[in-house]
Amino acid sequence: MDPDWRPGNEVERDMLTALEASDGKRYAELLRTSPLYVPSFGDGDQEDWPEGLPRIDDEHVLVFTSPVTLFRALAGPARGYEELHYTSLRDRWPDPETQLVVNPGSPIGVFLSVKQVDDLAEGIEKLMPVEEIQNVVSDTMIEQLRQLCLASLGSDEEVAARALTDVIPNELERQLETAVEDLDFDAFLLALLGSDVVALTTEAVADPSRIARRDFPWRVLGTDEAPIIAVFSSHQVLDRVAPGGPHRAEISFLDLLASWPDDDYVMCFNPGTTTELTLPGGGVPELAAAMADAADD
């Protein structure tokens, strides 16, 4: 969400007030009676698409309540906009299940169908902010990656859930569990920052410094569309989650981050346990930056 967003007009100020008061009826009334702005794009303009926004298709319509908010969200791809009123929008997209993505990236963003707009106005439907939708999608994606990782290891969530309770925890595991209990993500990152971890490999690795070389034998799980590298807090946890003695290398977490093979690879750390950390593609560089910030603090 854009922390610097400000209302672009009186309508958006009223929408913000309605959301803060959980007044879905008022929000829907504003949506149905105010000018709406639908972005327009040139050929290829959706290539530079903002992360987190759904692509334009037959099922989703991006709608804004001011040109200012529209161009804050779509400064790159948008070439202009068309001004419509709600009745015209309904005529153009007559399917009541068409999903309206309203003011995405702003504090007044919501995600609802055309039918739900009318239900909101009648007070029989509740708003679902865009951020909540994104969190649901993110949680679903992480669950799917976890299941894919564990299946690739010949394991499952029931086995993985017992892994930490079946071993005597090492210092890293004690610190991670404390951080999880305290909901202290900075402490979680700092514990990893100063520790060694265990990564799966396709062959024995005698020298951990080999991780800095291009021929490091990463064992890649998952699929071509979702390649996964599994990482564990100890040999003992790995052996509980993936019995059979798979090849592995014990390396520092910092070296792991520095030598990560590609932004497309997903990191699954302690998958299925209470100290799980799943980072989809591009998440490892973000974690490295977050850890640097935590260390500075």
Image (spheres, grey):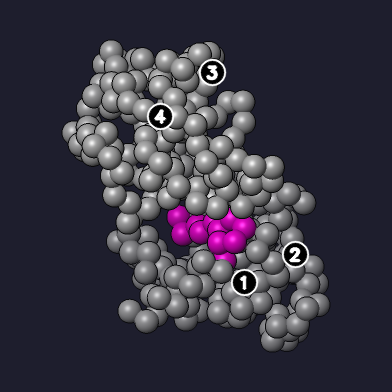
Residue 198 circle label: 1
* Residue type of the residue flagged with mark 3: Trp
Residue 93 circle label: 3
Image marks 3 and 2: residues in contact by CB distance under 8 Å: no
Left or right of 269? Residue 27 is left
Given residues 49 and 294, the one toward you in this image is 49
Magenta segment includes 281: yes
Where is residue 147 shown, x and y percent of the image?
62, 45
Left or right of 169? Residue 40 is right
Write down the residue under mark 4. 36
User: Measured along the vertical axis of the image, is residue 83 above or below residue 144?
Assistant: above
Q: Label 1, secondary structure: give it.
A: strand
Would you call the spot at circle 3 few (<14 residues within 10 Å), some (14-19), or many (20 or more)? some
Res. 246 visible in picture: yes
- The residue depicted at 48 percent of the width and 73 percent of the height is 289
Of circles 2 and 4, the one toward us is 4
Quadrant for residue 214, please give it: bottom right
Q: CA distance from mark 1 to mark 4?
A: 53 Å
Of circles 1 and 2, the one toward us is 2
Residue 219 circle label: 2
Q: Which residues are magenta?
A: 274-284
* Residue type of the residue flagged with mark 4: Leu
